[in-house]
Amino acid sequence: MVSFQRFIDKYLGYVIVLFLYLFRIFDRNGRNDKKFLIIKLWALGDSVLTLSLIRGIKETYNGSMVDVLMRTRVKDVYESFPLADHIYNLDSSSGFINILKKMRKYDVVFDCEPYFNLSAALSFLLGKKRIGFSRQLRSCLYNQTVRFRKDQHMVQNYLDMLRVLGKQYDTRSLEKLTAGPQERISVDEYVSRNLTGKTIIGITPGVAESSKNRMWFEERFAELSDRLIRELDAEVVFIDSQANADTVTRIILLMNQQPLNTQGLFSLKETFYLISKCDVYISNDTGPMHIAAAQGCRTIGLFGPNTPVLWGPYGSGNISIYKTPLEPAIQNDKGIFKNVNRDGYMGPITVEDVFDAVKKCLR
């Protein structure tokens, strides 16, 4: 489904972008930048990285309003961040209708999608001033552009969108996702019943549907988890989506020790809070890794097809393990996600590498 949507965006999206470009003559800039819109339609972890941009806008523009246009897959991220004023879900009929009422009502729109033509078209329809990434066909719809730099973290690429407006803002950590009272009650009850006060190590062994070659090997996760329990007297908690149930089941069957498996027990918002309970978090290059870093866990990210320079767990004390000699198979700014050579990308990372990183985090 995701691949089909990317295909439609690539070809039909080009036509839409070129058509809208003809109407650039009607551009007009407002005198005051007070109403801002963030467009972020995809990618759970990437959405977490945009929250720093929202805070940067709030802190550099007094009295500003910052809305978010997103899709269902990432709505829990923005609903768990109190600085977002209004959230519009493009997948719901009410959200779609309400955002249509905002045509050219925003002073500035930040298009935080790396390559989608649809997001550029939406920014053109909704904003007087549009800011997005350069060197793409869709860039013609923006008033100002920034480079998609691969020599700095993605957080900094998003903050460059604010800097191009003359606002200097930076951060050394991600924005924490807040939990409501009901989410706290549910998770706290589970923790009090099942965790004994030992060191808690969360693990996400799966990845989302694109680029499965980002996933470390089940047998190595099993060996690592056994060692964490046996040698460090830690509680190992598997935290992953139901879509990766088979992966987690295979790992547990390979283990000699007994971990905890929380799949299917909690909503996504409850999972945000559960992750905050972990002392150390181990994850492939996928959304929960960024959530863990945002929640203040010492986070270990396992990388292969993509570079941690762009996507590593942001913040001091976090560790990225990246050992492949191969060129990246993922180019986010071009929408290229090659699902190839898992052995070549993830094979060089050993159990000892990750075990040593855990001990370093605990020290």
Image (spheres, grey):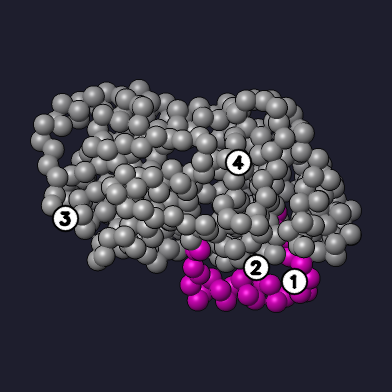
Q: Looking at the image, is mark 4 or mark 3 earlier in the sequence? A: 3
Q: Nearer the viewer, residue 227 or 100?
A: 227
Q: Residue at x 43, y 63 (%)?
A: 81
Residue type, mark 4 in image: Pro
Magenta highlight range: 176-203
Q: Nearer the viewer, residue 156 or 65?
A: 156
- Local SS, label 3: loop
Residue matched to label 3: 32
Are the residues tagged 1 and 4 within 8 Å (C-beta)? no
For residue 325, the mark is none
Residue 32 locus on image (x, y percent): 16, 55
Are the residues tagged 3 and 1 within 8 Å (C-beta)? no
**Residue density around tag 3, few if under 14, some if 14–19, many if 20 or more, within 10 Å:** few
Residue type, mark 3 in image: Asn
User: Number of marks in the image?
Assistant: 4
Are the residues tagged 4 and 2 within 8 Å (C-beta)? no
Residue matched to label 1: 195
Residue 330 locus on image (x, y percent): 55, 30
Q: Looking at the image, is mark 4 or mark 2 earlier in the sequence? A: 2
The span from disc 2 to disc 1 (Cα, nearest Å) is 10 Å
Vertically, is 333 above or below 75?
A: above
Residue 349 locus on image (x, y percent): 76, 38
Residue matched to label 2: 277
Q: Looking at the image, is mark 1 or mark 4 earlier in the sequence? A: 1
Q: Is residue 21 left or right of residue 139?
A: left
The span from disc 3 to disc 1 (Cα, nearest Å) is 52 Å
Residue matched to label 4: 308
Quadrant of the image occupied by residue 117: top left
Q: Looking at the image, is mark 3 or mark 1 earlier in the sequence? A: 3
Vertically, is 239 above or below 137?
A: below
